[in-house]
């Protein structure tokens, strides 16, 4: 594979692995445009470290009886969480325009979604919009018929991302460090055999990432959905169960026990 970098440098590689996240440029180059592989799930999220100017913000507090310590305010389709220095927002929004929305578009989405919010959420949003590190992105799910093409393989969110589903890191590490590396070593460098095995294993292992939409839980669209979510967060047992089950999505499946590769001469 010949790769040309932005700097103009050119290099030749045996294999190219795209582990460049849910908006993977490698995927776009090798498999086609993002719209073909990434489905928008109806909501965005935003994260920011809030400027500490202005009147002090309310202190985060434990949810009644629950293990989470945060200030959380929700109305249907919108949730704001403040954890002490940073805030996160999840909000329903129209799909981004075809192609990538720019930073200003995303800031506008956040401002519009919380335009009529009451305090303290209005203050959180106002500070977030002034934060140096405000990050806003869509909540989306990647749906790929195959994770490999020729000598290119996709891993992690580029291949099976599902924003905020709670197990993406586990899947990314298992796919990269374990399955792809293990299969390449087991196939003695025969990438065709290794990619086929890796693809089949990860398709099974990453199955939970191909369904589900975290925004329906994080920012439920109905009052009933919100009520149920609050009840769950108020219960330490149910909250622990939820966290355990999302962990299990990444870690519970059976994987081959790959031998440690021989040291290189
Ligand atoms: C707010 C939030 C909370 C989350 N919480 C959890 C959680 O609790 N548990 C969990 O398991 N997962 C969680 N996730 C998901 C997790 O972060 C991802 O699934 C995981 O990081 C995917 O790893 P990745 O290596 O595939 O992609 P990424 O972590 O997105 O890494 C991709 C890397 O590629 C780089 N890159 C992109 N394009 C280029 C380019 N053109 N050139 C060079 N470099 C490039 C990026 O800078 C980045 O460093 C969360 C995600 C978010 C957004």
Image: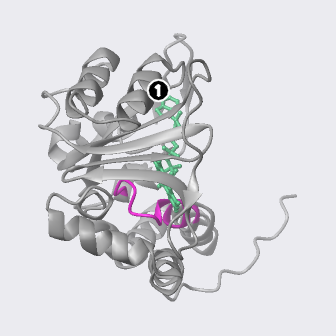
Q: Position of residue 5 (x, y in %)?
A: 50, 19
- The colouring scheme, among rainbow, by chain, secondary structure or one colour, is one colour
Above or below, comparing residue 63 to residue 48 in the picture: below
For the residue with label 1, is its CB less than 8 Å from the closest atom of ligand 1?
Answer: no
**Nearer-the-camera pick, 136 or 59:** 59
Residue 179 occupies quadrant: bottom right
* Residue under the image location 42 percent in, 63 percent down: 192
Q: In the figure, is residue 70 to the left or right of 192?
A: right
Q: Which residue is mark 1?
A: 134
Q: Position of residue 169 (x, y in %)?
A: 54, 60
Residue 77 covered by magenta stretch: no
**Nearer-the-camera pick, 94 or 257:** 94
Quarter occupied by the C terminus: bottom right
* Residue under the image location 16 percent in, 57 percent down: 221
Q: Position of residue 21 (x, y in %)?
A: 44, 43
Q: In the figure, is residue 113 to the left or right of 156?
A: left
* Residue under the image location 45 percent in, 64 percent down: 166
CA neighbours of label 1 inside 10 A, class few (<14), some (14 to 19), many (20+): many
Q: Which residues are magenta?
A: 161-173
Q: Can see residue 211?
A: no
Q: In the figure, is residue 81 to the left or right of 160?
A: right
Residue 165 covered by magenta stretch: yes
**Numbered label tally:** 1
Q: In the figure, is residue 72 to the left or right of 96?
A: right
Q: Position of residue 198 (x, y in %)?
A: 45, 70
Q: Can see residue 102?
A: yes
> The residue tagged with tag 1: helix, strand or loop?
loop
Above or below, comparing residue 50 to residue 179 in the picture: above
């Amino acid at each position: 594979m010949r790769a040309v970098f932005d700097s103009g440098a050119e290099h030749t590689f045996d294999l190219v692995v795209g582990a460049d996240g849910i908006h993977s440029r490698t995927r776009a180059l090798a498999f086609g445009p993002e719209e073909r592989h990434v489905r928008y799930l109806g909501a965005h999220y935003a994260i920011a470290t809030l400027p500490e100017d202005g009147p002090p913000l309310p202190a985060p507090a434990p949810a009644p009886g629950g293990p989470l310590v945060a200030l959380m305010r929700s109305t249907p389709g919108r949730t704001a969480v403040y954890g002490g220095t940073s805030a996160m927002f999840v909000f329903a929004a129209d799909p981004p325009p075809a192609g990538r929305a720019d930073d200003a578009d995303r800031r506008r989405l956040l401002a519009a979604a919380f335009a009529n919010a009451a305090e303290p959420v209005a203050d959180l949003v106002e500070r977030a919009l002034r934060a140096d590190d405000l990050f806003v992105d869509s909540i989306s799910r990647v749906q790929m018929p195959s994770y490999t093409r020729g000598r290119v393989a996709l891993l992690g969110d580029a291949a099976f991302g599902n924003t905020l589903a709670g197990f993406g890191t586990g899947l990314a590490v298992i796919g990269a460090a374990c399955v792809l590396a293990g299969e390449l070593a087991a196939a003695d460098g025969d990438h065709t055999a290794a990619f086929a095995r890796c693809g089949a294993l990860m398709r099974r292992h990453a199955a939970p990432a191909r369904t589900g939409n975290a925004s329906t839980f994080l920012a439920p669209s109905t009052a009933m959905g919100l009520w149920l979510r609050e009840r769950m967060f108020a219960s330490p047992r149910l909250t622990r169960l939820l966290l355990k089950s999302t962990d299990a999505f990444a870690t519970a499946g059976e994987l081959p026990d790959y031998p440690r590769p021989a040291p290189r001469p």
